[in-house]
Amino acid sequence: RKEVEQDPGPFNVPEGATVAFNCTYSNSASQSFFWYRQDCRKEPKLLMSVYSSGNEDGRFTAQLNRASQYISLLIRDSKLSDSATYLCVVNIPTGNQFYFGTGTSLTVIP
Amino acid sequence: DAGVIQSPRHEVTEMGQEVTLRCKPISGHDYLFWYRQTMMRGLELLIYFNNNVPIDDSGMPEDRFSAKMPNASFSTLKIQPSEPRDSAVYFCASSLWAGSTNEQFFGPGTRLTVL
């Protein structure tokens, strides 16, 4: 079983739509969770951390469900500029290293 | 700060040749990571260093791969001899240890093609 699993998509949504991505992780002792964004042929960049209580940053909302070991990312009012691959990232408890999911591809269509 | 710097940005080589990838982390960061990204396997951690010391190299595919960090501002990843299946984008990333907010900053990557 992979440490982090994501639906690869692709998700093709119209502008203004709401889209949600889920990610499951296998290590129940993981403490840090993140969503990274990767544009085509670019490096991954941190989009947002995911906190236990859930957190929001503008149109983006991240949720953590420890009991079911999954995290989610909700994007409201999608923009063309949201088109990218979204990577789910989970730390391993014993050190400062992370597992990256293979990413979910999003294309926002005009 | 200029961010994480990697060179070369693109490398095309022939099977059997030695390839050396270079990375300069963000000044003051004490962790450095080497990743490989392919369409099939996504982003895989190869090795990481803490204060220039290799901590975990379990992701290094085989003996053809080696990595060094001679000082806090420079690291290399070497493949010798290279094979076509090594073709991928290789990213270097650095971070501070800051508990739950230890963001990793990635370099622009080296796109390696082995013919």
Image (tube, coloured by chain):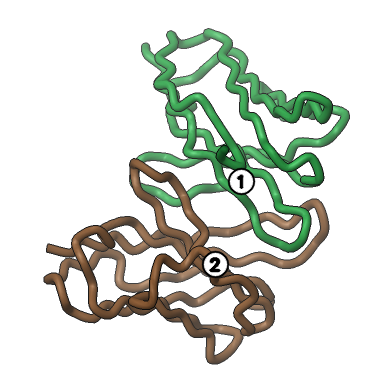
Chain colours: A green, B brown
Rendered-image quadrant of the N terminus of chain A: top right
Letter of the chain that mark 1 sits on in the rendering: A
What residue appears at the point 48 percent right and 54 percent down from the top-left corner? B44
Mark identifier at residue A14: none
Identify the element where label 2 is drawn.
loop
Same chain assignment for discs 2 and 1: no
Foreground residue, B64 or B32? B64
For residue A105, above or below residue B113: above
Residue placed furthest toward the front? A1
Foreground residue, B34 or A44? B34
Q: Is residue B3 visible?
A: no
Mark identifier at residue A46: 1
Position in image of residue A32 (x %, y %): 76, 46
Rendered-image quadrant of the C terminus of chain A: top left
Side of B95 where B20 appears, left or right: left
Q: Which residue is label 2 attached to? A: B58
**Residue type of the residue flagged with mark 1:** Leu
Side of B2 where B113 appears, left or right: left
What residue appears at the point 21 percent right and 67 percent down from the top-left corner? B83
Position in image of residue A69 (x %, y %): 74, 30
What residue appears at the point 62 percent right and 23 percent down from the top-left corner? A22
